[in-house]
Amino acid sequence: MEPPGAGRTRRRGAALEEAILRAAVDELTESGYAGLTMDRVAGRAGTNKNAVYRRWPNRLALGIAAYRRLTTTVQPPDTGDLRGDVLEMLRRANRHWSSPLGAILRELLAAAGGASEFLTQLPEESSDATAAAWLTILGRAVARGEASPEALHPRVATVAIVLLRNEFVVRGVPTAPDEVLVEIVDEVYLPLVRHRGADSARPRHG
């Protein structure tokens, strides 16, 4: 009889952490966040549940870490036109939120509630990362003369993606029709950006 564990390599540190994360990614993609459990991840990784809990204190933290493995950083579009750039960014986000991966994201957001310590770990919910991408687009528009430098404000830059996010998170839609994206751009975003420039150019009295 071989002793328990004979023939298996005992993994520690980074190697064990990587095995757990790979197992969590597989569980998340196969069963969604609802089907993700510490027991199943531990079994799939060939370790015990305590090893998982030592690295991630709860299921949500592990789910977010696994989700981050599934996402990639995409460069902002550069169509040569502010309207085209904003519309393309919204269409990309809409495709993502409507996809199976987006469904996982919505599950994670629902589980996190308003807990900022979890929300900031999600790429889509990181205010700094989101603002940076949208400020890049708006900065190009300023350089082309399409917008005033006064429009370069994080809240102004990100208002379009916030409105689209609300369609999914607040209204619970499975996908946003393209006409909704066009409406966000033409009725809200572009008028807001142009208004910021107009305010600075308008003479002040008194």
Image (spheres, rainbow, N blue to C red):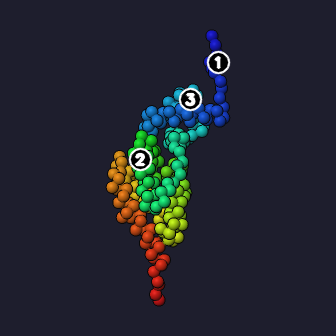
The residue under label 3 is which amino acid type? Answer: Ala
Residue reaching furthest to the front: 80
Q: Residue furthest top?
A: 1
The correct choice, above or below, for 1 with respect to 98 in the image is above
Nearer to us of marks 2 and 1 is 2
SS state under label 2: helix
- At x 43%, y 34%, the residue is 31
Q: Counting residues from the N terminus, which is met first, the one under dot 2 or under dot 1?
A: 1
Where is residue 14? Give x, y as percent. Answer: 65, 36
State yes or no: discs 2 and 3 in contact (Cβ < 8 Å): no
At horizontal 64% and vertical 33% (from top left) the residue drawn is 15
Q: Amino acid at mark 2?
A: Arg
| 1 or 3: tag closer to the N-terminus | 1
| Crowdedness near tag 1: few (<14), some (14–19) or many (≥20) residues, C-alpha within 10 Å | few
Q: Which residue is denoted by mark 2 in the rendering?
A: 95
Q: Quadrant of the N terminus?
A: top right
Circle 3 residue: 45
Q: CA distance from mark 2 to mark 3?
A: 31 Å
Q: Amino acid at mark 1?
A: Gly
Quarter of the image for residue 166 reads: bottom left
Q: Visible in this render: residue 111?
A: no
Left or right of residue 17, residue 88 in this image: left
